[in-house]
Image (spheres, grey):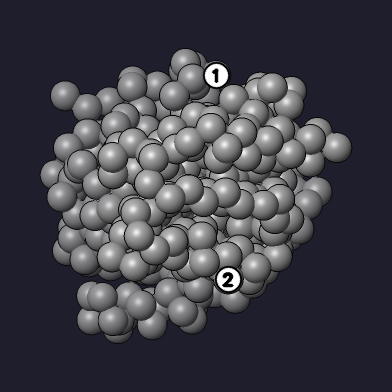
Amino acid sequence: MYRPVHISDSIYYVGVNDRRTNLFESQLPLPYGVSYNSYIIMDEKIALIDTVDVCFFESYSKKIEAAIGDRKIDYLIVNHMEPDHSGSIHLIREHYPDIRIIGNAKTIEMINGYFEITNNLQEVKDGDQLELGKHRLSFTLTPMVHWPETMMTYDITEKALFSGDAFGCFGALDGGVIDQTMNLDKFWSEMRRYYANIVGKYGVPVQNALAKLQGVEMNYICSTHGPVWKEQIEKVVNLYSRWSRYEAEAGVVIAYGTMYGNTGQMAEAIAEGVVAGGVKNVILHDVSKTDASFILSDIFNYTGLVLGSPTYMNELFPGVESLLRKIEVRQVKNRVFASFGSFTWAGVAIKRIAPVIEGLKWDVVGSVEEKQALKQEKYNECFSLGMEIANKIKG
Ligand code: FEO
């Protein structure tokens, strides 16, 4: 029923696809599912790298058996403790009671906290190595990509980097595992959405990790989510470098809430102005229709953001407030910004947005606020604001 899935002669893929979960971390939609990747290195000693969500243990254990037969696993290397990867640690230990679990000091503390496991643990420090026979592994601590205990394992012999969440993406694997055997179309946007929402807060730690990887030869990047990168290594490393520096393409995201359509009409007028100003990449998002994870992904991709909100109960419209908070938490940098909104009796929305954007030190072009329905004068102001943003982005 299961067959061994080779990455190389002695590295096997034993991950699973999750096509059932609707919301990753109970908040992020998974339209294409997600994979939880785990790997085996076969040698005189056998190492298992990370596990999978515990709900998938049954098929996971069969995949392991297909790869290693009745041999025993000697080491479980834990690169990351988030439960989508650590969830099966205790069941793996039940199957392989002599297994030695490898992690850094923070990992070991978490293994104790999550599973009350205190024996057969081996602590490694940055740069430590482990011999499996022909394969020699080296451990690199990469804290906050995505949790404090995160580390990467590099197989010096095969030049394979087991990178944890880094370079991973949403999207289950549709039959293939290595990038060169697959149609990658869905993965590029899902990789950016993954980055923006999961890792996006940690730009500096990602830069630090990339600096540690500088000059390391890689035949494979084996992440915990998405395809194994072989042909596309340069591209995915460059994407991480770009996103972690908050670099973006010329373009404008216009995200807004609208209850009766008035703020929405302002969004349309601003978009017309942006296009008239010569910027082609314009994306409008109604925050009540598009999940914030997709909007954030576009905000990571484009240099301009225009945020619009009606005044609601003397505050921001809730969907806009939530999006603004997500942007603030991720400390997105270097964006051109404008705001707009409408109200019926008291205009508050713009005032609520301003201090957050000030804190991010973005380049603020201006704002437009209308009382009740959109009228010609404010339509013109919206259009002009769009043109100004376009000029700023082009300039
Ligand atoms: Fe895929 Fe941070 O776990």
Q: Position of residue 365 (x, y in %)?
A: 71, 50
Q: Position of residue 76 (x, y in %)?
A: 38, 60
| Residue depicted at 38% across the width and 82% down the height | 109
Identify the residue shown where x is 73% and y is 26%: 277
Secondary element at tag 1: helix
Q: Nearer the viewer, residue 174 or 4?
A: 174
Query: Against 338, is 349 above or below?
Result: below
Residue 94: percent from left, percent from top: 17, 63
Q: Is mark 1 within 8 Å of ligand 1?
A: no
- What is the quadrant of residue 65 in the picture? top left
Instruction: Left or right? Give the position of 141 relative to 175.
Output: right
Q: Which residue is mark 1?
A: 180
Instruction: Tell me residue 290's x, y (percent).
Output: 34, 38
Say which of 323 and 30 sits in front. Answer: 323
Q: Identify which amino acid the numbered label 1 is placed on.
A: Gln
- The C terminus lies in which quarter of the figure? top right
114 or 305: which is nearer to us? Answer: 305
Amino acid carrying mark 2 in the image: Pro
Q: Residues within 10 Å of mark 1 (few under 14, many from 20)?
A: some
Is ligand 1 within 8 Å of the beta carbon of the residue shown at mark 2? no
Indicate the secondary structure of the residue bearing disc 2: helix
Q: Which comes before the other along the chain, label 2 or label 1?
A: 1
Which residue is found at the position 68% from the left and 35% from the top?
384
Q: Is residue 82 above or below residue 230?
A: below
**Residue sitting at 16 percent across and 24 percent down?**
1
Q: Residues within 10 Å of mark 2 (few under 14, many from 20)?
A: few
Q: Residue furthest right?
A: 395
Residue position marked by numbered label 2 in the rendering: 355
Disc tally is: 2
| Apparent side of residue 109 relative to residue 191 in the rendered image (left or right) | left
CA gap between label 2 and label 1 equals 47 Å
